[in-house]
Amino acid sequence: MNLKKKKILERIKHLEDAIVKGREYLESGKHAHWNGFRPWFVEKIRDGKVLPPHKDWIRNVFLPRNERALKRAQEILENLT
């Protein structure tokens, strides 16, 4: 298998897993402390505990970003085949 195809397939799998975790978090709160939800710079801390991400951020930012990236990766894979 071509190295480019392999890397793109790995990226697609990673993005699909992230989307599933985001949807599970919205439905049940599962994966609240998954490292993919962590902020880049500063975590929100209250009473010495790290707060999970806000559900609106997951719904309006995290999921759409990952879905767009997944769509782009699938288009690139189609162009390579």
Image (spheres, rainbow, N blue to C red):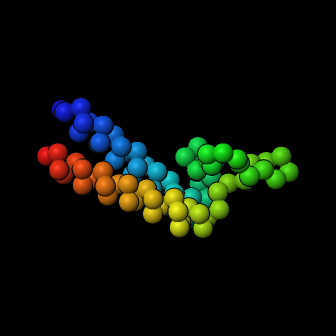
Residue in the picture at 32% in, 58% down: 71
How many numbered discs sit on the rendered protein?
0
On the picture, is 45 further left or further right than 33? right
Q: Provide residue 65's location: percent of width, then percent of height.
A: 45, 59
In the picture as drawn, the residue positioned furthest to the front comes out as 41
Q: Provide residue 67's location: percent of width, then percent of height.
A: 40, 59
Residue 24 seen in render:
no
Tell me if residue 39 comes above or below residue 71 in the rendering: above
* Front one among 47 and 8: 8
Residue in the picture at 58% in, 43% down: 35
Tell me if residue 71 comes above or below residue 39 in the rendering: below
Residue 80 seen in render:
yes
* Front one among 59 and 30: 59
Q: Provide residue 50's location: percent of width, then percent of height.
A: 74, 48
On the picture, is 15 further left or further right than 56? left
In the picture as drawn, the residue positioned furthest to the left comes out as 81
Q: Provide residue 38's location: percent of width, then percent of height.
A: 62, 47
Residue in the picture at 18% in, 51% down: 78
Residue in the picture at 17% in, 45% down: 80
Q: Quadrant of the N terminus?
A: top left
Q: Quadrant of residue 5?
A: top left
On the picture, is 44 further left or further right than 21? right
Tell me if residue 68 comes above or below residue 35 in the rendering: below
In the picture as drawn, the residue positioned furthest to the right comes out as 47
On the picture, is 13 further left or further right than 47? left
